[in-house]
């Protein structure tokens, strides 16, 4: 899946969330890394173990927004260096590997983005 392409070409609006209050008022899920799960109490979160599965979750509409730092966004999306596996087992969604060694994963790659707003 080419997430950078998706992020630019998605037909519905892909914009900046102006505040966590907006997420709360719209009762939306936010994609976060497991390490950031304590961030923003009260916000509905979907946790991921790595950035690539988190961005794939955003593309797959499991979340309406993702919390990612500008530096990480540039390293992963704009540089085109993002690549990871994503577990496709329903019980391990959001993980780069499956708990069951026989679980199925798929490769997700991000190619470079030429957008000026990331």
Image (cartoon, rainbow, N blue to C red):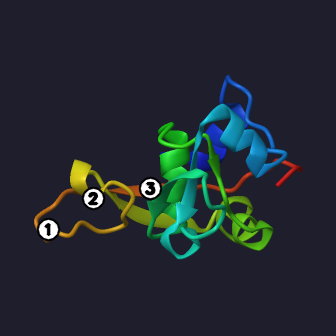
Q: In this view, does 84 lie to the left or right of 17?
A: left
**If the image is split into quadrants, where does the C terminus sit?**
bottom right
Q: Is mark 1 on a helix, strand or loop?
A: loop
- Crowd rating for badge 2 (residues with CA inside 10 Å; few <14, some 14–19, many 20+): some
Q: Toward the viewer: 117 or 69? A: 69
According to the picture, the residue beneath numbered tag 3 turns out to be: 108
Q: What element carries label 2?
A: helix
Image coordinates for residue 10, horizontal then vertical, percent: 65, 30
- Residue under the image location 61 percent in, 52 percent down: 43
Looking at this rendering, what residue extends furthest in the front direction?
42
Label 1 with label 2: CB-CB less than 8 Å = yes
State which tag comes first along the sequence, 3 or 2: 2
State which tag comes first along the sequence, 1 or 3: 1
- Crowd rating for badge 3 (residues with CA inside 10 Å; few <14, some 14–19, many 20+): some
According to the picture, the residue beneath numbered tag 2 turns out to be: 92
Disc number for residue 100: 1
Q: In this view, does 96 lie to the left or right of 30?
A: left
Image coordinates for residue 29, horizontal then vertical, percent: 55, 44
């Amino acid at each position: 899946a080419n997430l950078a392409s998706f992020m630019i070409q998605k037909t519905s609006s892909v914009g900046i969330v102006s505040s966590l209050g907006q997420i709360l008022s719209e009762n939306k899920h936010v994609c976060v890394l497991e390490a950031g799960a304590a961030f923003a109490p009260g916000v509905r979160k979907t946790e991921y173990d790595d950035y690539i599965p988190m961005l794939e979750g955003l593309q797959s509409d499991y979340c309406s927004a993702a919390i990612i730092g500008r530096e990480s966004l540039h390293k992963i999306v704009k540089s085109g260096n993002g690549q990871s596996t994503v577990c496709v087992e329903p019980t391990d969604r959001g993980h780069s590997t499956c708990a069951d060694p026989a679980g199925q994963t798929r490769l997700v790659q991000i190619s470079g983005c030429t957008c000026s707003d990331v």
